[in-house]
Image (cartoon, rainbow, N blue to C red):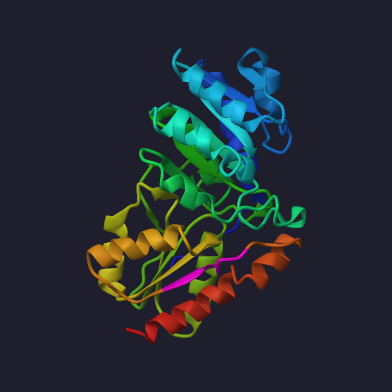
Amino acid sequence: MKKYTNTGNKDTRSGFGDGLTELGKTNENVVALCADLTGSLKMGDFKNNHPERFFQIGIAEANMIGIAAGMTIGGKIPFTGTFANFSTGRVYDQIRQSVAYSDKNVKICASHAGITLGEDGATHQILEDIGLMKMLPGMTVINTCDYNQTKAATLAVAKHHGPVYLRFGRPKVANFTPADQTFEIGKAVQLTEGTDVTIVATGHLVWEALQAAETLEAAGISAEVINIHTIKPLDEEAILTSVAKTGCVVTAEEHNFLGGLGESVARTLALNTPAPQEFVATQDTFGESGTPAQLMEKYGLNAASIVKAAEKVIGRK
């Protein structure tokens, strides 16, 4: 099995910030709007280098979305930045009406997604945002796994015409994908080859899936790991091709099992070739306060949980 090396833990939000900084130098139509969280979203370099293209909206997220939608009419490419909870739940009506329904070229960039923002607790965590956003017609939904992939995705969405939800996180996590990668929206990345079980993972759970695959290999189980960075449009071909070989699948995500990646995969299988599936995700619950590691352990969002799910789903074949 191919091994992946962690080149050093880095936060995915810094990947977004560095990607935005690069876009500021190369694309004069890129503008940035922030809801009073410039430091948390790593938008400071863009602000300092391009103050005429940076707009501090304050704690007025709905207004920020409306302004961003209006700016697209003049040909600008607005990137909005705030926490995932405030990027989606707080402003859903504005996104639905002003961005998605109107097919505006707004890039909704969301940090502190999932449960790993940790100590801020359930009111700031969000575990339903992927479901909210993927249900909007025309909305592209991206959930990156590490610093390098987040930077590459930030550059890629600027070239994509149409509304995008780009989801990333707060904590420092393993950085293991290539620095020079080309990010292709809607194209899954197969990380390992396997014959016994397919593990389809997204976001912070991709590295956990790779660790699980190593544990499974030591037990004589061959796992194929697929990084689904784009949840919508979903790379159905990659999933169906893999599951046709392995006969079963585990989905892993830092999100509620209702409405997330797992449900999209289940729908794909149901409409094509049904197969046993297990979900590694939160189970219809809110989070709570704690360190990211504590919460991932408590809510079963780690390599050990993926291993157990793989063993269970293989038994169902």
Give the residue displayed 54% in from the left and 25% down from the top.
66
Give the residue displayed 51% in from the left and 41% down from the top.
166
User: Left or right: 174 with respect to 162?
Assistant: right
On whether residue 156 falls in the magenta region, the answer is no
Depth check, front residue: 194 or 29 = 29
Q: Position of residue 163 (x, y in %)?
A: 43, 33
Depth check, front residue: 257 or 278 = 257
Q: Position of residue 276 (x, y in %)?
A: 34, 77
Depth check, front residue: 111 or 159 = 111
Q: Position of residue 270 (x, y in %)?
A: 27, 67
Depth check, front residue: 7 or 52 = 52
**Looking at the image, which residue sits at the far left?**
272
Give the residue displayed 68% in from the left and 26% down from the top.
45
Number of numbered discs on residues: 0
Task: Point out the stretch of residues depicted in magenta.
Answer: 278-285
Name the main secondary structure of what is drawn in magenta. strand
Give the residue displayed 47% in from the left and 52% down from the top.
131
Q: Would you place residue 99 above or below residue 168 in this image?
A: above
Quarter of the image with the N terminus is bottom left
User: Left or right: 4 with respect to 187?
Assistant: right
In the rendered image, is residue 137 in sight? yes
Q: Position of residue 316 (x, y in %)?
A: 36, 85
Quarter of the image with the C terminus is bottom left
Q: Would you place residue 36 above or below residue 76 in this image?
A: below
In the rendered image, is residue 156 in sight? no
